[in-house]
Image (cartoon, rainbow, N blue to C red):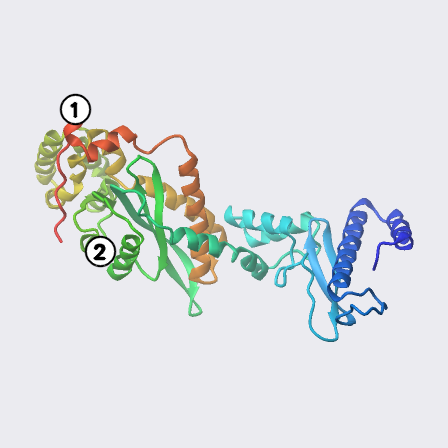
């Protein structure tokens, strides 16, 4: 269809009888179709029913194609050729939704909007047919390339003295069964004090082999300069840290440790025990921290021998933070920063419920982490000041006493 004078007048008459929304859809559909026909004419060197020496192919009817746009569903006709094939450059072969709606759907997906609500949103924007779950998944598969590029980026440009490790769990279908999948996350504090998301992975369990493979992937990408690793006391994770991040001290998360302790005492005594243990972390220097733990362990041991044993057994790992600058203590003695990140992932993934496969879970969790990483990079606020981070490499220039961290036994 060419937009000659006659065609324009016919279109005008049709638009007069339609309401505003239909006018926009009809005009857009006409324009798309005209552009498609014009491109084909340029491609084969001849218009409809035109005979020229330059013609390279002949038209052979059309096939229907629905394109969902913010102007509504456009019913287009894609020309066919007797020999060869043609596809309009305006369209993408496997995409039946225009770029504007594509952006809307992807943004809604990343913010944890359910598929049903995405469908309602697409319909409200004028797409009568809505959008299916499979279409949402296919659209968001385009995120895979971005997420993969982020996961594989080099970490060799600078050192990361502090590394935080943790995992959260979500549901996904594996071999037609709904199973729990671990989303493991590593974040780090760079030498300049900024935080970065170092890596993430999805696996069947939080076992040692999985963690070991994950940490080795970070090392292969250039992770170096790690002095302290902060995590919970998962046995497989501890073994992986010791085997891969050789030379780094290990800080047992004080929050996870407290939960473990309180699980061993009656509920009526929980607040008293917690308050006593918190005094250990309120001391002004490393010497007083260690002496206070000894005092509290002895005091609690009279009523709760198990708690005393836990405190004394965990002393070196629980107080590893004391070997680092005092101004860093509150930021490195727990995995609380990762806990907040885990909650954001759970907030987004809970809307989905059960992911169709682990790859879909990795896609959404990865997109959330890429978004968080970018926000950290543009923020004017550092996690730790650059001046205080310099104490880790030049303690002799500091007025703040910095003990050398003990190496974790392998």
Please indicate whether residue 188 sits to the left or right of residue 285 in the image. right
The number of numbered discs placed on residues in the rendered structure image is 2
The reply to whether residue 6 is in sight is yes
Give the structural element (helix, strand or loop) at label 1: loop
Query: What x and y, as percent, mark residue 107?
Result: 55, 47
Distance CA(mark 1)–CA(mark 2): 35 Å
Q: Quadrant of the C terminus?
A: bottom left
Q: Determine which residue is flagged by label 1.
A: 399
Q: Quadrant of residue 63?
A: bottom right
Q: First in sequence, mark 1 or 2: give its number.
A: 2
Give the residue displayed 71% in from the left and 55% down from the top. 128
Coordinates of residue 101 in the picture (x, y in percent): 63, 50
Report if residue 182 is visible in the image.
no
Circles 1 and 2: CB distance less than 8 Å?
Answer: no
The label on residue 240 is 2
Q: Secondary structure at mark 2?
A: helix
Residue 260 x/y as whole percent? 22, 46
Residue 276 vs residue 280, the one in the foreground? 280
User: From this viewpoint, which residue is outermost toward the bottom?
Assistant: 83
Quarter occupied by the N terminus: bottom right
Residues 324 and 172: in front is 324
Disc 2 crowd, CA 10 A, few/some/many (<14, 14-19, 20+):
many
């Amino acid at each position: 269809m060419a937009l000659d004078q006659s065609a324009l007048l016919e279109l005008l008459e049709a638009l007069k009888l339609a309401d505003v929304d239909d006018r926009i859809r009809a005009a857009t559909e006409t324009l798309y179709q005209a552009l498609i026909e014009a491109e084909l004419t340029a491609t084969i060197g001849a218009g409809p029913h035109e005979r020229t020496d330059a013609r390279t192919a002949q038209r052979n009817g059309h096939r229907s194609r629905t394109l969902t746009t913010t102007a509504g569903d456009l019913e287009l006709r894609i020309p066919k050729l007797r020999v060869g094939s043609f596809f309009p450059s305006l369209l993408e072969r496997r995409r039946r939704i225009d770029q504007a709606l594509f952006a809307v759907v992807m943004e809604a997906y990343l913010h944890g909007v359910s598929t049903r609500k995405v469908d309602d949103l697409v319909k409200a924007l004028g797409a009568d047919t809505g959008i299916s779950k499979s279409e949402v998944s296919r659209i968001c598969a385009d995120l895979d390339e971005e997420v993969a590029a982020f996961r594989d980026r080099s970490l060799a440009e600078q050192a990361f003295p502090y590394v935080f490790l943790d995992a959260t769990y979500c549901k996904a279908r594996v071999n037609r069964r709904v199973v729990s999948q671990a989303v493991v996350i590593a974040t780090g504090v760079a030498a300049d004090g900024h935080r970065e998301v170092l890596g993430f992975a999805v696996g069947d369990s939080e076992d040692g082999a999985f963690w070991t493979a994950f940490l080795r992937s970070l090392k292969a990408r250039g992770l170096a300069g790690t002095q302290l690793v902060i995590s919970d006391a998962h046995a497989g994770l501890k073994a992986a840290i010791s085997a891969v991040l050789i030379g780094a001290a290990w800080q047992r998360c004080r929050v996870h440790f407290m939960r473990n302790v309180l699980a061993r005492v009656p509920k009526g005594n929980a607040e008293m025990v917690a308050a006593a243990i918190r005094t250990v972390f309120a001391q002004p220097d490393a010497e007083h921290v260690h002496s206070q733990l000894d005092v509290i362990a002895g005091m609690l041991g009279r009523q709760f021998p198990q708690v005393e044993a836990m405190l004394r057994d965990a002393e070196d790992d629980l107080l590893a933070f004391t070997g680092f600058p005092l101004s860093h203590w509150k930021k490195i003695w727990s995995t609380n920063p990762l806990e907040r990140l885990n909650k954001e992932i759970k907030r987004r993934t809970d809307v989905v419920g059960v992911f169709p496969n682990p790859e879909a879970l990795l896609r959404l969790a990865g997109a959330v982490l890429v978004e968080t990483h970018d926000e950290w990079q543009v923020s004017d606020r550092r996690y730790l000041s650059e001046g205080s981070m310099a104490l880790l490499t030049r303690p002799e220039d500091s007025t703040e006493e910095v003990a050398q961290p003990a190496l974790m036994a392998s």
